[in-house]
Amino acid sequence: MTTTIRFHQYGGPEVLIPEDELVGRPQAGQVRLRHDAIGVNFIDTAFRQGIFPMPLPGVTGVEGAGVVEEIGPGVDDVQVGDRVAYFLSPGSYAEVRLINTADLVAIPQDVTSLEAATILTKGLTAWAALNGFYKLRAGDTVLVQGASSNVGLLVARWARALGARVIGSTGSQDKLAAIRSSVDYPLLSGDATFADQIRHLAPEGVDVVYEFVGKATFSVSASSVRDGGTIATIGAASGAPEVDSAALSHRNVRVVGGPMAQHLQGRVLSATNDVFAAYRAGTFGTYKAAVYRLKDAAVAHADIAARRKFGPMVLVP
Ligand SMILES: NC(=O)c1ccc[n+]([C@@H]2O[C@H](COP(=O)([O-])OP(=O)(O)OC[C@H]3O[C@@H](n4cnc5c(N)ncnc54)[C@H](OP(=O)(O)O)[C@@H]3O)[C@@H](O)[C@H]2O)c1
């Protein structure tokens, strides 16, 4: 028997319950994977709440890293004992799971499973932000709404490394100090002069806004982007924003969004290599996960809901 975290109804963190599970044998094209570490992402909380409905009882989580225990019929691209990770395959809050080999990427030898589960989804989302949603150029002025989020932090650090000038926001006074070393200009989004401060830093408007917050910040994003600029609505942690498409299109502002996976098609291997290379090169800076026991997944979710943590989180069985 192994442990799987299930929810039988949508709701708060308390609906996440550890249950015993007998994971069966892998089918054609699948492996049975024993997790060393499971990445925690904001989207996990959306599955749990039913914002993204899934059949009940459900298992949230999209990311994990571990060791292949058994391969299914016809599998020849992965072997028993391989260390692998994945980034967008729902059902990861489990000690052991079945998964399609098409979803797996190899973990380099110099990267631990814990590190892979910490950086893969967030790093690939940051990669998509800088190469897909918008192609960042050196010298661009960038506004990261939610530079305190785990993805936003990587976008800010990577954009700076690529030669951009980065304005970053947080909604929490405590996190202002935490993002200070990762952006050129840290700002508090709840400040009454937030929009004016951005306009002072970028009188013509910023070239691109990376939105991770949504409803709470979008009006400032719209007023801060330059005519002809881009708003990439990658996340909406505070809820879906109201977008005045007509006004933005009148100013030739491009609003792009949707899943990051659309930008990885045919490029997963090269994007993954870029993420691991950036990690090795120190571009991600200090990016150490807070570790929770898998059975304490509800505690991790409560910490996300309370916005009291800064930095990534992983679950370990
Ligand atoms: N499009 C995609 O494929 C894709 C992929 C990955 C992630 N995402 C999205 O990107 C966003 C960031 O993901 P993440 O995993 O990096 O999240 P995270 O680390 O949990 O950070 C979320 C941040 O959002 C802010 N926030 C949360 N609730 C808020 C509220 N009610 N009002 C205002 N701000 C709030 C918090 O910042 P402060 O406390 O500093 O204000 C928090 O640090 C999420 O919306 C996620 O769903 C999208």
Image (tube, rainbow, N blue to C red):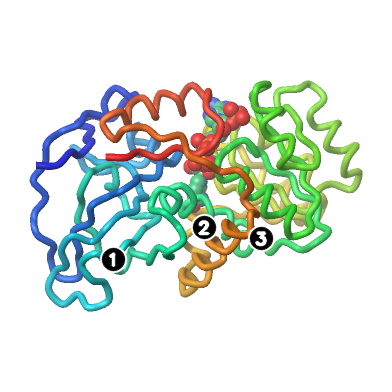
The residue depicted at 76 percent of the width and 63 percent of the height is: 137
Residue underneath mark 1: 82
The residue depicted at 78 percent of the width and 21 percent of the height is: 192
Disc 2/disc 1 C-alpha distance (Å): 21 Å
Quarter of the image with the N terminus in it: top left
Q: Position of residue 226 (x, y in %)?
A: 82, 50
Ligand 1: quadrant of the figure? top right
> In the displayed structure, would residue 227 be above or below residue 201?
below
User: From this viewpoint, is residue 238 visible?
Assistant: no
Q: Which mark is residue 124?
A: 2
Which quadrant of the view contains residue 153?
top right
Label 1: which secondary element: loop
The answer to which of marks 1 and 3 sits earlier in the sequence is: 1
The residue depicted at 60 percent of the width and 43 percent of the height is: 286
Which quadrant of the view contains residue 127?
bottom right
Which quadrant of the view contains residue 281?
bottom right
Counting other residues with Cα less than 10 Å from the Cα at mark 3, is it few (<14), some (14-19), or many (20 or more)? some
Label 3: which secondary element: loop
Q: Position of residue 72 (x, y in %)?
A: 14, 68
Residue labelled 1 has its Cβ within 8 Å of some atom of ligand 1: no
The residue mark sitting in front, 2 or 3, is 2
Q: Position of residue 55 (x, y in %)?
A: 22, 43
The type of residue carrying mark 1 is Asp
